[in-house]
Amino acid sequence: MKRTFVTGILSLLIAGLVAALGLVVPASASTIGSEGCTPGYWKNHPTSWQEAKPTRLLTKDHRSVRIVAFAPSTDDLNHDGLPDTYMDALSFKGGSDLEGAEQILLRAAVAAYLNAAHEGVAYPLRRQTFIPEVNAAIASGDRQTMIDLATELDDLNNLGCPL
Ligand SMILES: [Ca+2]
């Protein structure tokens, strides 16, 4: 009887230990799940960024050949006379014309990039998948194509932020 009790306590302890360990195992950047943080979150938490600095230029190539750079129609979409950075993109205002659509898409796309790059966010998409789609939508010159993709990314960026 006593032995069963001790065994039961031990089982509970082990189960608790496993659960505790499970909580601290970091999710991999390649984790595919259903989490995402918004452009607003990333804009306000630049110290949480992984694999990109806020000053990184939108058009800068990535070291990994499997991740292509963003390809905006111009490197100065916010017209401040300087090449746009990842942080600039999170502040793009959007608008009703083609350039506005491109801003809306890139704002969502940079948040998507940061979600996909972060080890603690189980984002559903990989960068090597959606960045070419973003570039193709921009190259299409079709506002609705850009808005549709932006909406898809926005939905994922609003899945819920674990950070
Ligand atoms: Ca600029």
Image (cartoon, helix red, strand yellow):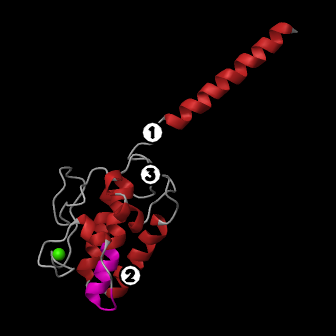
Dot placed on the residue nearer the N-terminal end, 2 or 3 = 3
State which mark lies toward you, 1 or 2.
Answer: 1
Is the residue marked by circle 1 packed among few (<14), some (14-19), or many (20+) residues within 10 Å? few
- Residue located at (16% from left, 58% from top): 61
Which marked residue is nearer to the observer: mark 2 or mark 3? Answer: 3
Most extreme residue toward the bottom, as rendered?
96
Q: Amino acid at mark 2?
A: Ile
Give yes or no for contact between labels 1 and 2 (Cβ–Cβ under 8 Å). Answer: no
Residue 137, compared with residue 113, is above or below; it is below
Give the residue type at disc 3: Val
Ligand 1 rendered quadrant = bottom left
Q: Are marks 1 and 3 in contact (CB under 8 Å)?
A: no
Q: Which residue bears the numbered disc 3? A: 121
Mark earlier in primary sequence (1, 3): 1
Q: Is residue 156 above or below residue 80?
A: above
Locate residue 160, reporting x and y percent.
52, 60
For this orientation, the residue located farthest to the right is 1
Residue at the spot of label 1: 26
In the rendered image, which quarter is residue 134 located in?
A: bottom left
The alpha-carbon separation of the residues under discs 2 and 3 comes to 24 Å
In the rendering, at what x and y percent does residue 39 appear?
39, 67
22 part of magenta stretch:
no
How many residues crowd mark 2 within 10 Å: few (<14), some (14–19), many (20+)? many
Between the C-alphas of marks 1 and 3, the distance is 10 Å
Quick check: is the Cβ at mark 1 less than 8 Å away from ligand 1? no
Q: Residues within 10 Å of mark 3 (few under 14, many from 20)?
A: many
- The quadrant holding residue 57 is bottom left
Magenta stretch: give its range: 95-106
What distance separates the C-alpha of mark 1 from that of mark 2?
A: 34 Å
Identify the residue shown where x is 52% and y is 63%: 159
Examine the rendered structure and indicate whether residue 103 appears above or below residue 51.
below
Residue ID for mark 2 = 147
